[in-house]
Amino acid sequence: MSGQQLRESGRFLLLCAGLFSAVLVVKFAYSARWCPTTQGINGLLQMRHVDYLFIGSSRTRQGYDMRAIERATGKSAYLLAYDGLQPHLAVKLLEYLLDRSQPTIGLIILEAYPYIAMRKPSVEDSRIFYNAPAALKLELLKTWQQTGMSGTDMYALSVAEGNEVLLTAFCTRKLIERRTYHGGYVDKFTPGMPRRRFQQIQEPEGVRQSPGHLTPLETQSLSSMFTLADQHGVPLIMVEPPVPQAIAQGAVYTAGRAELQDLAAMAQIPYCTFSDRLFNPCDNSLFTDPLHTSSKGRSLLSRRIIPLLIAAEKSPTLVKSYYGVAAQTAIPPTAPLPHRHAPIAFIRP
Amino acid sequence: MAVSVQGKRVLFNSLQFLIFFPVVTTLYFLLPHRWRWLLLLTASCYFYMCFIPIYLLILVVTITVDYVAGIYLDRCDRIEPLDAFHTVSDYLGGYGRQQQQAILKKRILLASILCNVGMLFFFKYFNFANSNLAQLAATLDWNYPIKHLAIILPIGLSFHTFQSMSYTIEVYRGKFNAERNFGLFALYVMFYPQLVAGPIERPQNLLPQFHQPKQFDYALLKSGLKLMAWGFFKKLVIADRVADYVNSVYNAPLGQHGLTLITATVLFAVQIYCDFSGYSDIAIGAARVMGFKLMTNFNVPYIALSIKEFWSRWHISLSTWFKDYLYFPLGGNRVSTTRHYLNLFIVFLVSGIWHGANWTFIIWGALHGIYQILTVLTERAGEQLRHLLGIARLPVVDRGVRMAITFTLVCFAWIFFRAATLGDAWQIIRTIVVNTRFTRDDLLAALLPFSGDNTAVSHALCTLMLLGVFIVAELWGRPWYARLRLAPSTYYVRQLAWASFVVLILTMGRFAQNSFIYFQF
């Protein structure tokens, strides 16, 4: 290779590196600006006050209708949901939110989802990164580094993911904003499951082979969230979105739920479930797949949670003491769906 | 995005390859010519052993058998048979000398082919044949004792087996002298750029290149790297992007809308082309950097005006393999019309079987066989119809219509290729026929699999934009970058364009290390 050829190659490599770095810096600093303002952390930061802040995974997003809740309660509600959001990432979001003066939060409704707290750390929804402001991005990167994420995955998350939304923001942002409201879906139709498929539901193979315990990282993250909320004086309740009976009675799910209930009980955090009378786990039309509710299910669940929200807001201690006591005893792994939890509609201040 | 555990395979689209390739290339040019084959062979062994190390033994057996067969076939032509193969010739007593040689050569070839095909059958088709026989036995209420074998299919088995077989056949035909250097022959079968997914090379093209001393050529380096970049773009930016859509639809075809299934099928056509031709481009580019010239494998197949033309543009190394070593020996088209049709059908049926041990692949191959026969049968009628409708006088419309018909037929066959089972394929076709509407709900449902959430519209638009770039580049001269050769004064513009292209791959590519589709064959 001659000197001139070496120089040419060097110049080209420098040009590539320069362009790449420029794209990276711009994306890191400004990606949140081009994201839709009606969903995710970016949308939440646009608000001044949120009465009810739901934090969870796609089960929470698909479970509640923000407009219906706001209409029924006259309060503001926001759904901070990312697919497969694990507590160790949720705590980072909460930390960032509570450290800021805006938005102020009335009540936190934290999703209780046993499977997700049993999994190894993973990221299913890259929006959590590119929706976030730069400071939060840095925190997330640190967390991923600590949890042993591979370099390739870290690269994919920080460089390759979300570019579609950012590149086409000039014409798709408004469209996306029209289809979402306060983090939740607008007019999204998700059909109920066919009865035959519903009857075949069982705990996923991967879940059945898992150790069946909450991981120490997620347990610690949940405790941190309880402490954080307490320190900032924001009431927090844990709510378990309903699942089909076959899942709810699964050995792994029940074991995980028992651990979550114990954890909540120790921190005096109310742990709320929906009784069969309020949300029938045997009705296939209420579920669109083994974990998510259908449109009909979402509509019903949004109605059913309203009394709890009102109760918790008016007197969180009453809810706290009631559920705190109820969750003291762990459920044996093979026990049927726990009926010992009172339906949430019974809770009256 | 689901973050997964990373494998240690040296895929072209892996970080490991980014280290492996420059190291091997640099060492290649640093070493003297006489040691280069050893370096390439070692690198190829390492490349292959990164998948399942023990399977290297399969290659060793194939290489040894074909090497020995080649030597003996060559000797048959050169040495007096009675001297060289005393015992065998005694056994063949009664025939003339030339006849004895011919019979002996045939037997050596047959033994080599049987060994290769036997290996292929055992690893690739045994379980398929066994399960079908077990089903048949169960239907007839017979006792069937042979158990399913827990075998993992060696990566690229069909490719290197066919490449090795082409050597034996060429030596048998006397078109190529047997390679005496075992290491070079092993390198011919194992040359890492094309080891696991082709192009399936011929000995005349590749083996002599290993003998020629190669000098470092800056122009070849640039051209090879450009071709590799184009291959990476096709694989990482296009194929893996549309794969998300295709997989989500084809893995659960029940309950999908007709429009969604049509979109998924068209996108699969794009995916498989970009995936496979992307691999070929990377392979050809990587070989070019080291000074080797591999055969062209794809030539913009979706602009074909007929199925016949499609097969002259798609997977050219395999199509020509079948043409040279199966179609012509069967008699080609120099036989009766019926036999010609049968030959066409056999070739495509075997091509289907080559692709995989599943009825879906067999039906896919059979469909292409039927297409070929229908093309021959309707050639004249089609011509007359085009004249009657006046389309023939409008070349653009004529080409457009014929291209659209060919593409539709190819896509229809892809349904069988991609579907997991025949049942799924029928279900997909039924839904497309019965349940294709263009209502708002159907359009929204067709958008959703792009990302599975409300950003689907962004993903769809972005995919369309990238497909636009890809189509323009593909059609804009071949090699496509020829058009980017702007005037000398615009040197910096060219550099900037290429740098932007590299950044586009780095930022828009999917780096989840998805395997190449054709590795499974």
Image: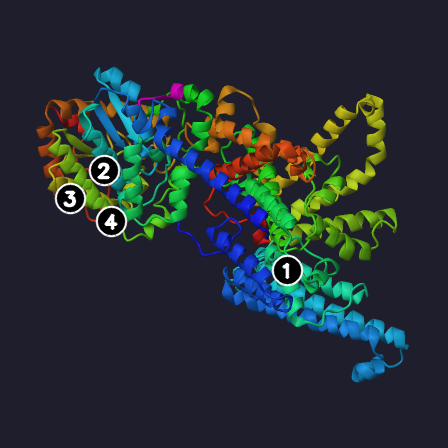
Residue to which mark 2 is pinned: A91
Q: Give the CA separation, mark 3 to mark 2.
A: 19 Å
Q: Residue A262 got which mark?
A: 3
The magenta stretch spans residue B470: no
Badge 2 marks a residue whose secondary structure is: helix
Q: Label 1: chain?
A: B
Q: Position of residue B425 (x, y in %)?
A: 58, 40
Q: Which residues are magenta?
A: A177-182
Q: Are marks 2 and 1 on the same chain?
A: no
Residue to which mark 1 is pinned: B160
Q: Amino acid at mark 2?
A: Val
Name the N-terminal-most of marks 3 and 2: 2
Residue to which mark 4 is pinned: A215
Residues under numbered marks 3 and 2 in contact, where contact means CB atoms less than 8 Å apart: no
Q: Position of residue B312 (x, y in %)?
A: 74, 44
Q: Nearer the viewer, mark 4 or mark 2?
A: 2
Q: Residue at x 89, y 74 (%)?
A: B98
Q: Amino acid at mark 3?
A: Asp
- Looking at the rendered image, the quarter that the C terminus of chain A falls into is top left
Q: Give the CA separation, mark 4 to mark 1.
A: 46 Å
Q: Give the CA separation, mark 3 to mark 1.
A: 59 Å
Q: Is residue B12 above or below residue B239?
A: below
Q: Label 2: chain?
A: A
Given residues B126 and B394, the one toward you in this image is B394
Q: Residue at x 89, y 77 (%)?
A: B97
Name the N-terminal-most of marks 4 and 2: 2
Q: Position of residue A302 (x, y in %)?
A: 27, 24
Q: Amino acid at mark 1?
A: His
Q: Is residue B374 above or below residue B29?
A: above
Q: Residues within 10 Å of mark 4 (few under 14, many from 20)?
A: some
Badge 3 marks a residue whose secondary structure is: helix
